Amino acid sequence: MTEPTPEKVVELVIGLDERYNFMNFVDPRRPKRLFLDLSERCELVFTLSDQLINAGWSFQRRPIEIQRDFGVNFSSYVWVPYSIGGGELAPRSRFKIIYEDQRMGEYTYSLLMLDSHGQKIDLDPNIDNGAGRVP
C-alpha cells in the first residue's frame, strides 16, 4: 500500500549568484541559500534555473545521492518534464523525491549536475531534520 503524495511541496531552483554560489532561485529577485524544510513529510522538487539550462547544464543520469539514508527517509527520484516559457522540453532539468520523515538525523545529499562542457559538478550540502547539530 502506498502513501498519498504529500500536501507540502518544497521547491528548490538551483542557480548561481554573481559570486558563483549555488542558491535557491524560487524567487529570482531574492535568491536564498539552499535550505530544505524537513519538519514534516513533503515532496521535494529540484529544478535547474532557466539561466543554467540556457547555458547547457543538466542533471546527471542519477541526479541525487543521499548518504546513510538506506531508503528510509527519501524515496527514489522521478524525472518531471520541464520547459522554459512553454517551449521545447529541457531534458534532465527537474526531478522530485518524497521525504518521509521517518528517522531523525543529519544527512548529506549530493546534487549531481553536468555543465555545458559535460564536466561533472557535485554539490554536497548537509540537511538536518531535528537531531543533528549542536549550536
Image (cartoon, rainbow, N blue to C red):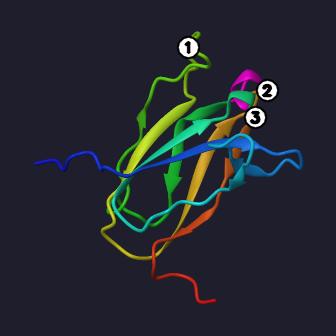
Q: Are marks 2 and 3 in contact (CB under 8 Å)?
A: yes
**Residue lying at 39% horizontally and 76% vertically, measured from the top left:** 104
Vertical order, 119 against 56 (above or below): below
Q: Amino acid at mark 2?
A: His
Give the spatial CA distance, label 2 vs label 3. Answer: 5 Å
Q: Amino acid at mark 1?
A: Gly
Q: For the residues carrying marks 1 and 2, which lies nearer the camera in this image?
A: 1
Q: Residues within 10 Å of mark 1 (few under 14, many from 20)?
A: few
Q: Are marks 1 and 2 in contact (CB under 8 Å)?
A: no
**Residue lying at 65% horizontally and 38% vertically, measured from the top left:** 113
Name the outermost residue toward the top.
Answer: 88
Q: Which residue, given by chain and number where applicable, does mark 3 sit on?
A: 119
Vertical order, 3 against 128 (above or below): above
Give the spatial CA distance, label 1 vs label 2. Answer: 25 Å
Name the outermost residue toward the right.
Answer: 19
In the picture, measured across the screen, residue 91 lies left or right of residue 23, that is: left
Give the spatial CA distance, label 3 vs label 1. Answer: 28 Å
The magenta segment: 52-57
